Amino acid sequence: MKRWVLGLLLMATGAISAFAQSGGGKVTVSGTVVDGTDKSPVIQAGVQVLSVKDSSVVAANVTDVDGKFRVAARPGKYLLKISYIGYRSDFRTVYLNANRPRLNMGEIPLEIDAVMLGEAVVVAEAPEVIAKEDTLVYNSSAYRVPEGSALEELVKKLPGAEVDESGKITINGKEITKIMVDGKEFFADDPNVAMKNLPVNIIDKVRAYDKQSDMAKMTGIDDGEEETVLDLSVKPELNKGWIGNVDLAAGTEDRYSGKMMVNRLVGGNQFTVIGSANNVNDAGFPGGGGGFRGGSQNGLNATKMIGFNYAVTTEKLESGGSVNFNYKDTDVRSKQNSETFVSSQSSSFKNAIDASRNKSTNLKADFRLEWKPDTLTWLMFRPRFTYGKTDNGSSSNSFTFNEDPELTTDELVAADDITSLVSEEKIINTIVRNTLSKADNINAQGMLLVNRRLGKPGRNITMRMRYNYTNNDSEQFSASHTDYYQTAEEALANGVMSEILNRYITTPTRTSDYAVRLSYSEPIFKGGFLQFSYDFQYRNSKTENSTFDMPDDWAVNQGFLSDQAVFNTDLSKNAEYNYFNHQAEVQLRVIRNKMRFNVGASFQPQRSTLSYTMGDYSIDTVRTVFNFTPTLDFRYNFSKTSQLRVNYRGRSSQPSMTDLLPITDDTDPLNVKLGNPGLKPEFTNTLRIFYNTFNTEKQRGVMTHFSFQNVMNDISNRRTYDETTGGYRTMPENINGNWNLFGMLGTNTALRNKKFTINTFTMARYNNIVSYISSRETLSDTDKNKTRQLVMSERLRGTYRNDWWELSLNGSLTYNHSRNSFQEQNNMDTYQFSYGASTNFRLPWNMSVSTDISQNSRRGYTDNSMNRDELIWNAQISQDFLKGNAATVSVQFYDILRRQSNISRTISAAMRQDTEYNAIYSYCMVHFIYRLNLFGGKGGRAPMGPGGFGNGGHHGPGPRRF
């Protein structure tokens, strides 16, 4: 196999070398088109090479998402025209010389055309959001946030944006996977670094768009691997030297926080050092109220991080990368009560209290190198290295019943004898478990991408090679004590039967993954291209699981292997997995003035082998499958600010090899796992439709998103319940009927000279969830439980703002309609609604005040403890001082009324669960913030009153252009 791959690479290298000998006799003109005001890239600007004699078009192209263009023409004298609506066209005379095959025009600024824009040149107030084709552009100055806020607080205010407790960001339902600064990657694929540490006061605009993959960017062919990114542009006056920001804080309840950022932004190059440490869950200032989360998250989190990021650009070479060290210490305590639907007539009820202390250390180094030795060749190399170490400990106490005990978890835990509170006939089991786990993980990966243009526009050949190696060593110590109350009579002769399991398990895993892809693109007619590609992937994975039984008197907190340990042959297992995948793909791409159309299909013959040993069971098995994956992408631009996009993708995925083995794994007696040799592959259909339009004159925009997804042969789990032990036997099983619909409509409207704005966000989601519910060994259609869930929500915000004051009124309503086919008593019609106000104003003596208050309510839950009202009030007062108001002292108050809680409910076709977590609630913090700007020019140290960049990113009076 190695010889075959080597031969393939040599053939590709030879082909590239041969193609390098022919350049087609044309000269390539390249450059970057930017906004003349803020130096941000101008996307989809028209680039034309015109004949000097008659102004006819010789060649044409458009700029990409980075504002870059590339166009080729034969040697001669031409007129280069750069144009985009709202800007004055730029004309330049160019001389193309055959002895100089490339001509780089550098940065070409376009100036605003005030006559053409008319009312689009807004005095005093910037529009909140505009749409340029498939790119949404948010003006930071239109959103006031409290002094010293990080990027997260700005993103929360963007129309259609959501930031959940884990830090996941979505814009109009699409997850943000990367954050960029002035078009350059910022800490690779970790958006939280920017969200928690970048100060709002340096940000001018926030752009949201779908960024093509490296492969698609090189070839011009959509490969379906695009990602949605936020691209931040730094204020022009700060993009000239060193800027820094230090934020130190201490508070009540032993809370502390510290942030530091030093940034060098010069000539398109970036150098950034970021550091932070806090024990406030990285919440920042809530700033705007609304929502039950407020400043709390699950558990108490203390984090420390330091990182370095850089991006350097020269004529032929672009390089960038980041190194990030992170330490996190999490203390999570939770109380749960849940109901699992066993059949149409019965359920299993469980109460549990859990406590865990998890410590993790991570080091990540990620780099990127792009080299263009000539106008026809493009090379990219991306190496990455990560190291992670975890040290986790947990303890739990759980109680399982065959009827609802109607007692709280606290009451059950406090009881010396549970039978004094609940009759023995209702109790199934009680479990006390302690666990200690440790792991070390090393990962090294790299990607090399080489593209060669072959003279004729659109004709190119590309080779991509990838490598990924993972070395993971983990060990787990566990001790559990289980009391069974409903076992057979002979087992109960001496009272309740008890089971003690003390185990030590080691699981070293090694994985190597190699892949090579060759693709060729050929123009077949004007604006039409065919791409052929072949992809080969090989993966090898080895896992050795060794299980030891420990003595009954062994304590898990000892954390070492006892001399009395006994190797458990029946539960120890070894597996070696080999995977071979061949993929042949063909795509047709059609480009017109207002339309782009991609359609394609890939064919994937796969072969997998597995050598598996568990106890006396040993097997070598081979699986061969064939996958077919269609894709379609259609885009139509009605205008520069109005676009329709339709996207369809089909994906086939295979069950794991171990799921296909006829084995039983009873390492955990209450969670026995079985294999299923009859599993079929699942196929997912996904259809998405996007439409957005924006009226630049009236500053009114509409954004819509619709999606449909269904899964054929979805791999679900059939759980057979044992009423005597409370345990489950789980087997993967194919099931049909899982699908969902999602739709959203967002509007942004400016009123009364743009001082009033109204934002709405309407969302509806319908989920059809199907799962197996059975207490029997045989299945039928009646064993399928269907949950039909409709979720509708509306968010409305109205804002008035002028030079020194902003007032927002906001409200939201979420309705959840859920119907369960097995147990109608678990049907739900619940409401969550909130309403409130926030204000941010600047006083004449360099003082600012921010406050928000919101009433958050729940209704419709059968458990009255879930129906509650919470009035959340936060406030901040800050004072600027020192020369240029470079320093700020602020006092922040969180949850002043002490009304916040952290309770959630989840429901599926198989169960419903209510959980309450510990969290950070009411406290007060005092912040000291210092901003440093060196060599930034006169505009860099602007006064910090109204119009200064210290006012939450708000710009002052004067024309504001976009």
Image (tube, grey):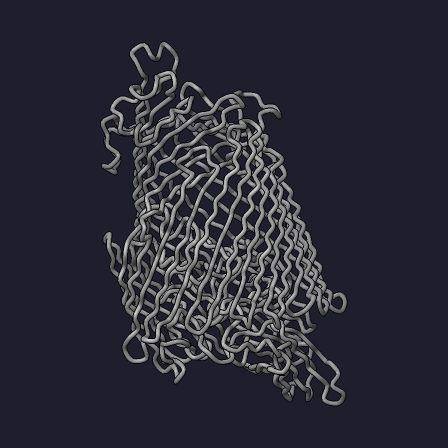
Residue 778: name its quadrant: top right
Say if 202 sits above or below 426 in the image: below
Q: From the viewer's side, name the closer residue of 652 and 257.
A: 257
Q: Describe residue 228's horizontal placement relative to residue 351 as left or right.
A: right
Residue 758: name its quadrant: bottom right
> Is residue 467 visible in this depiction of the protein?
no
What residue is drawn where x is 37% and y is 76%? 945
Q: From the viewer's side, name the closer residue of 532 and 209.
A: 209
What residue is drawn where x is 72% and y is 63%? 590
Residue 679: name its quadrant: top right
> In the current view of this chain or complex, which residue is farthest to the front?
752
Say if 507 sits above or below 286 in the image: above
Residue 185 screen position, x and y as percent: 47, 66
Q: How many marks?
A: 0
Q: From the viewer's side, name the closer residue of 316 and 832.
A: 832
Residue 122 screen position, x and y as percent: 55, 76
Residue 594 screen position, x and y as percent: 71, 67
> Is residue 332 visible in this depiction of the protein?
yes
Residue 378 screen position, x and y as percent: 56, 70
Q: From the viewer's side, name the closer residue of 284 and 955.
A: 955
Say if 645 sits above or below 270 in the image: above
- Quarter of the image with the C terminus is bottom right
What residue is drawn where x is 61% and y is 23%? 780
What residue is drawn where x is 39% and y is 84%? 937
Q: Describe residue 672's horizontal placement relative to residue 626 as left or right.
A: left
